Amino acid sequence: MPLRSTANNSQVALHLYRETLRECTYLPDPAARIYISSYVRSRYRTVKSKLLELQQKEKKDKLLKQKLLARWTRALASGRKYRNQLRRANEGEQECLKRVLLHTYGRAGERRYALLQPLLLADPQEIPIVQYRISPQYSRLKALAEAQCQLGISSGLSRIPLKSSVASFPRNNQWARRMPVKREKNLLKRWFAQFLDKLFPPLPEDEWERLRDLASGEEPWEGPRPRRTGIQYNVSNLHPDALEMILAPRKPTIERSNGGISRPHQITARYMRRLWQKVFSETPVLQWDTTRNDWKVKFGTINRVKPTPKLPDADRLLFVGVSNKGRIER
């Protein structure tokens, strides 16, 4: 893609920003509409501040002009990619819509790390740290890790399930010598990073209950928001160049392959419940148990009950006087 000027890029970014926010308003999940739109605003403001800072430096150093335009190109490409993902999610593609829900409820992305932060705060009691094990000071983190290890569940983003909450390393190296302290420290740091990557952060209790009601169908879904109709133009008032662009034949496009991308699906209440159930199965909640004086971890489970079919009145009359075993009642 040829590099454009900064003024043209600013205009393209403004249109892209509005298109992305417009796609956020059509997301089928109410919480996703709020979270994704705020996430988009935050990302655009961050990138804008960085580009403005680089633009101020470019006035003093002319060699930074190509770097600035290349940065604009990468930012616009990333924005188009995210807008297209939201557009495909609104069309009903399962992977894109599921990714939006995972980011909304903190199973992936930026909010996942924000929900992990409270677990990394130690309890106020002064308890000595146990080496290679989670300290009792981090009671919430320890309870969550032990509960997740017992269940053995993995994330919808193909994460390996958490197998143990204890870091165990060989005492000696391959030369049968004592493991160096620095090597041992690096191994422990790497294990802890992988441990946090596999851990499911708990959701606040009010959001967890709302997600449970959506997954079970107790809270009625309001349905997808209809798109606004386009502006009707009077053809007689259009400029000849604009009329030529409308009537000109479209250029042939290359159809994208469906490899790795699910086909669009009609967004129905049943389709959304299944996606909510997948996200809910990976979502724990922490509750304080007063009897045990410890944290209680509860993962989302849905009891699927098959609905009993309802016969029409005309068909029900045919079975009057017949028991459930198929015998005529006398």
Image (cartoon, rainbow, N blue to C red):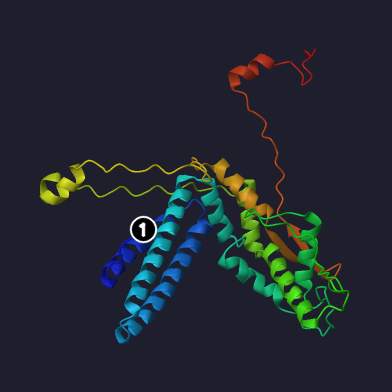
Query: What's the residue type where badge 1 is placed?
Result: Glu
- Please tell me which residue lies in front, 56 or 170: 170
Instruction: Residue 200: tell me if it is visible.
Output: no
Give above or below for 136 relative to 300: below
Q: Tell me where residue 232 appears, x and y as whole percent.
A: 22, 47
The reply, left or right, for residue 311 in relation to residue 123 is left
The reply, left or right, for residue 252 in relation to residue 88 is left
Label 1: state its secondary structure: helix
- Report the number of numbered marks: 1
Which residue is farthest bottom?
60
Quadrant the C terminus occupies: top right
Q: Tell me where residue 111 appears, x and y as whole percent.
A: 58, 67
Residue at the spot 43% in from the left edge and 68% down from the top edge? 41
Give above or below for 293 relative to 127: above
The reply, left or right, for residue 58 in relation to residue 146 is left
- Please tell me which residue lies in front, 277 or 1: 1
Residue at the spot 61% in from the left edge and 71% down from the top edge? 114
Instruction: Residue 77: tell me if it is visible.
Output: yes
Corner quadrant of residue 140: bottom right
Which residue is farthest front?
175
How packed is label 1: few (under 14 Cα within 10 Å), some, or many (20 or more)?
some
Residue at the spot 46% in from the left edge and 71% down from the top edge? 42
Q: Tell me where residue 137 appears, x and y as whole percent.
A: 80, 78
Q: Tell me where residue 92 appears, x and y as whole percent.
A: 49, 45
Corner quadrant of residue 1: bottom left
- Please tell me which residue lies in front, 54 or 204: 54
Residue at the spot 30% in from the left edge and 84% down from the top edge? 59
Reading the image, the residue beneath label 1 is: 19
